[in-house]
Amino acid sequence: MIQQPDGGSHVQPDAGTYVRIGVVLSTVTMIEVAAFYMPFLRLVLVPLLLGLAAIKFSLVAMYYMHLKFDPRLLAALFAGGLLVAGSLTIALVALFRNL
Amino acid sequence: MWAFLGSDCLFFGSLVATYLVYYGRSKQGPTPHEIFNIPFTSVSTFVLLMSSLAIVLALANLQRGSRRGLAWLGVTVFLGTWFVAGQGYEFSSFVSEGLTIPGSLFGSTFYVLTGFHGAHVTIGLLWLMGLIGKGLKTGATPEFAYNVEYMSLYWHFVDVVWIVIFTVVYLIGAAP
Amino acid sequence: TGLWGWLTTVDHKRIGILYGATAFVYLLIGGFEALLLRIQLFQPNSTFLGADAFNQLFTMHGTTMIFLFVMPLSAAFFNFCVPLMIGARDVAFPRLNAFSYWTFLSGGLLLHASFLFGGAPSVGWFAYANLTSKTHSPGPGVDFWLLALQVLGVASLAAAFNFIVTIVNLRAPGMTLMRMPTFAWMTLVTSFLLVAAFPVITVGLILLMFDRFFGANFYNVAANGDPVLWQHLFWIFGHPEVYILVLPAMGIVSEVLPSFSRKPLFGRPFVIYSGMAIGFLGFGVWAHHMFAVGLGPVADAVFGITTMLIAVPTGVTIFNWLGTLWGGHLNLKTPLYFAVGFIGMFIIGGLSGVMHASPPADLQQTDTYFIVAHFHYVLFGGALMGLFAGVYYWYPKVTGRLLDDRLGQLNFWLLFIGQNLTFFPMHFSGLLGMPRRVYTYGPELQVTSYNQVSTIGAFILGVGMLVFLHNAIVSLRRGEVAGSDPWDAATLEWAIPSPPPAYNFLTLPVVTSSRPLWDQKYPMAAEDGPGGGHGNGQPGQVLAHTPAVTLTREEAHAAPRGQGAGGAVVPPADPHPHPLPAGEGTASSPLPVGEGRGEGPPRSQEEGAHAVPSDGHAHHIHMPSPSFWPPVTAVGILVIASGLLAGYPLAALGAVILLAGIFGWAFEPPA
């Protein structure tokens, strides 16, 4: 039962924006796949792919999931979970690679 | 719902962490590089991304009171089903190529991680179909639009998790 | 009313009672398991129990006490008290609340069914891999365990989401987060811990399930899997879990001490911040359970440091509690005894805990009874004593009658003496080398007398529990009638009758301080202090007061979207709530309400406001109607889990029931 802030003061992205974001998402995906096949990108591939994934993640979260326009608390809930999850992942991998 | 999604981050986070911890440690069985069909999975990725677009368009329509939103929900279900079917096909072809859950560490981690993602998508599909049924009865009321918005958060989350899986498991995993 | 009424209830108060009663049944079961263990350990080389029986019993004792006693009893208090404390009519999702209870019950039944169907799990409550593999534990016990825990996880997660949303959204107007009672704060922190920790153990359990059911390799050394992964996943959950166990009790103590010292909680904001800090830091210490696994010096050092850091906010809280007692006008009743007992025993447990935080010291202590001593001091002396303080404190609110205080004091002393007799000697037997989780010991270890004292102490504990049971049952009929505010307390739940009417508050209060009832009763004594001052500085006007129009928040609006809101209008059983000593003149509602609000009210809907006739009858308060879909859904989960054990067709049937339950729930008309 999430209460949206009252009054329509936030700007709702229109359908066109959503489609444009969809195009961006598709393009980024195609870039990722293309990069996968390019041998000269081997060294930077991992950071590149992770960065591109982060871009897609943010676009979906901020626009499709409307987080950019929502009360901070909701973003905090999600970001909190993400932060703990990310930290745990890093910690676990670090612990295991150390063995 | 956001609290639930925060929690689900930890669920998938632990599965991804397990996958990463065990990456490269399989003693036998096909490796990611050998078995992944990146073009095929890329299409699946694209389909799922487009389903997020579809549901967002559904919501925009419903919030304006337009019943066309229900049609877009149907498109979402179609695309989502296409994704799941693609996953199913992928899994069965991997199994026939020798990647099984008991067969290797990679098999275990891969199927469990992507399988649970697929299960999340499937639950989403059932939810969507239920919503469509409800929407056909009630029409594009604000309350219905709210229900769809709520569900769409879940749907986008599942898409976002796939973005992570596709990148980490498929692309990075299969890079030689 | 009647059995069907209890089965379909969505009223948070009834659900709280269900949780509490069930928790006490499991307390007795877990306690009985412990007594059997203690009989076995009374003498060296005893043959009272064989090794496997012993292993099953300590596994079940731990699992039962943690998941089926402490957590549900905390949930009972969350359920009953938090909506009342924050001035709400119910939780945000009443049917989900009912579902949580029925799912919890399913999990408990499933776990104990293992005794009947091939043996309980015998691998310890933490079930280390690869003892839990199919090879080493071929029986069904581990399967029961891992499925029951997943079911219980669903229940806990659902409840946690419910409480987060309730606390965030349903506070009364004027109740900012910092004005919210400390117990409600601890509920919020605990809920966040639940929401973050349970998914991790769910994954660990799923991996184990796949290993056992489908031959996966997660913990299979032969395939290069690693059993230590289980330990990590388990303790990433397990450590926050112990804070989940103790924070609610700390919240209770934070309510009881002010009430019985007749002073506000000393340094309340710091207690709240410390609670948050404990919750947050709790995620960074898990590997202190693994110091003997060989993680390496860097990991050991890091986790040792973070573990010692947690002592800081804990210490802050304890000093604030002492500051509350200091200079207070003490009302020496049973709840205070338990609360003070908590402080003492928790300190002892905390001291041994700090000792374990040092990896080198822990290498001697781990897997010995020294650890058993530590966690029983914090869990029994801490969590259980705190929860019992809550029981004695809130029993009058729940039932309308006070528990007998003399019996209560007897109860307290029996538990206090009993627990010290039982657990203190374990510090010594542990350091002398008596290992945990072993069914017997030799006389040459020279721990026999310690064990004998422990066993005697355990039986004293049993007697104490029986005294409590007697008190609880007898006081239901013959206890002194409590009235709405027997302890002269400060928070909102004491402003309404005991037991509360179904709709809780006749008119929802507007709050301008952290001690709304106290300031209402003693306006002359009200002064600006910690926790917020008054809305407008006039003594006696702490709660804004407009006699003519009172605002009601229709539950149908507060819980929209087909949550089954509305339904039968509930005529109050006692139409005239107990008047307050300060003699509130006009409205017959217990608290004057009005349109004025303190700064920054949380989102509340005033839509649907309409005048309630001031004769006090709740004509227009719609409460959510009962529903049988939550128990149906819970049964679906139980049948799926049983089917995974008994045969897949049964699981399929369970899935059908589950889906039917979910769709029935979703399509239930908002009556």
Image (spheres, coloured by chain):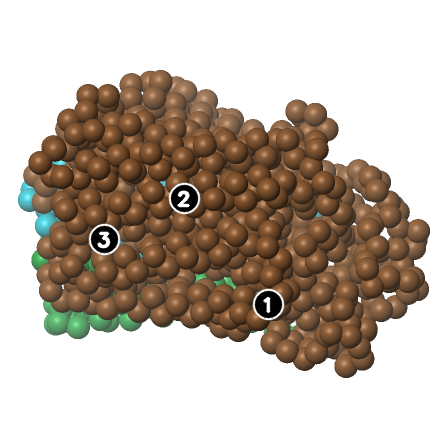
Chain colours: A green, B cyan, C brown
Choose the circle earlier in sequence order: 1 or 3. Answer: 3
- The subunit carrying tag 3 is C
Q: Is residue C577 above or below residue C174?
A: above
Q: Position of residue C416 (x, y in %)?
A: 43, 46
Q: Which residue is mark 2?
A: C417
Q: Is residue C537 left or right of residue C143?
A: right
Residue tagged 1? C328
Q: Secondary structure at mark 1?
A: loop
For marks 3 and 2, the one nearer the N-term is: 3
Q: Quadrant of the C terminus of chain B?
A: bottom left
Q: Where C650 falls versus C392 (above or below)? A: above
Task: Say which quarter of the image contains residue C651.
Answer: top left
Sequence-wise, the earlier of marks 2 and 1 is: 1
The CA distance from mark 1 to mark 3 is: 40 Å
| Element class at badge 2 | helix
* Chain of the residue under the numbered disc 1 shown in the image: C
- Residues at marks 2 and 1, CA–CA distance in whole angstroms: 26 Å
Taking the spot 69% from the left edge, 37% from the top edge, the residue there is C479
Mark 3, mark 2: which one is toward the viewer?
Answer: 2
The label on residue C540 is none
Q: Secondary structure at mark 3?
A: helix
Residue shown at 36%/46% (left/top)? Answer: C420
Q: Residue at x 81, y 60 (%)?
A: C581
Residue B95 percent location from the top left of the image? 19, 36
Instruction: Find disc 3 in the rendering and name its residue.
Output: C289
Q: Callout 3: 10 Å neighbours few (<14), some, many (20+)?
A: many
**For the residues carrying marks 1 and 3, which lies nearer the camera in this image?**
1
